[in-house]
């Protein structure tokens, strides 16, 4: 994929962030959540207490943060990225790469940490990435990433927490 196409997709994603979220608009979120029993569950009121309003929008309502707004874009240290909703480790820093899209990007999740969910909102077919433990929306995966997988897991920084590797 060319950089121009990536920028166009980034712009489309940013526009999606103006809405509640593509899957929320189509009802896919509640249908998916009803099908799964997650290890970590909370009422909507509890989620709102545990998360910031922006995190709640991304993780629970499938919103999208503005591109280039996350400090995690510039994070270069070794460590682990975890779901901000339940602290499940989802990506290792060794799989992070600079995609130029404005969101933290990885070429591979930690095995068993994420689920792929069909997202047919915003007039396009995409694959959303949700946390396996709490069902929180993390981002989307695209097939324009680097080797060895060729995948780009484009994540919302608000959906992640970074813990640097211990120096010792």
Image: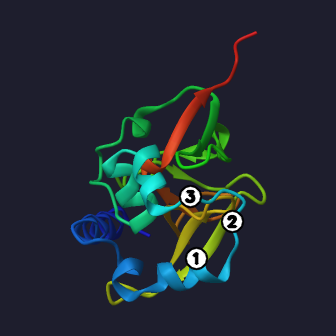
Instruction: Indicate which label's residue lies in the foreground, 2 or 3.
Output: 3
User: N-terminal of the two: label 1 or label 2?
Assistant: 1
Using the numbered discs, state the Cα–Cα distance from disc 1 to disc 2 in whole angstroms. Answer: 8 Å
Q: Position of residue 153 (x, y in %)?
A: 55, 60
- Residue 42 sits above or below residue 87 on the image: below
Residue labelled with disc 2 = 38
Q: Label 2, secondary structure: give it.
A: loop
Quarter of the C terminus within the rendering: top right
- Tell me the colour scheme of the image: rainbow
Q: Label 1, secondary structure: give it.
A: helix
Look at 56% across and 67% down and name the residue there: 129
Using the numbered discs, state the Cα–Cα distance from disc 2 to disc 3 in whole angstroms. Answer: 10 Å
> Residue furthest toward the top?
168
Residue labelled with disc 1 = 33
Q: Position of residue 138 (x, y in %)?
A: 51, 59
Instruction: Indicate which label's residue lies in the foreground, 3 or 1.
Output: 3
Indicate left or right for 71 with 151 as reference. Answer: left
Residue labelled with disc 3 = 42
């Amino acid at each position: 994929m060319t950089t121009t196409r990536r920028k166009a997709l980034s712009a489309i994603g940013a526009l999606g962030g103006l809405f509640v979220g593509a899957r929320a608009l189509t009802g896919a979120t509640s249908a998916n959540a009803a099908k799964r029993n997650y290890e970590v569950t909370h009422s909507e009121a509890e989620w709102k207490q545990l998360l910031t309003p922006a995190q709640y929008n991304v993780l629970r309502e499938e919103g999208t943060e503005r591109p280039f707004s996350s400090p995690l874009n510039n994070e270069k240290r070794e460590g682990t990225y975890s779901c901000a909703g339940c602290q499940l480790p989802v990506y290792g820093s060794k799989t992070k790469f600079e995609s130029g899209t404005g969101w933290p990007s990885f070429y591979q999740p930690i095995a068993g940490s994420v689920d792929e969910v069909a997202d047919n909102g915003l007039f396009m077919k995409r694959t959303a990435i949700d946390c396996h433990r709490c069902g929180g929306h993390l981002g989307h995966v695209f097939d324009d990433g680097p080797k060895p997988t060729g995948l780009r897991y484009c994540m919302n920084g608000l959906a992640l927490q970074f813990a640097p590797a211990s120096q010792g």
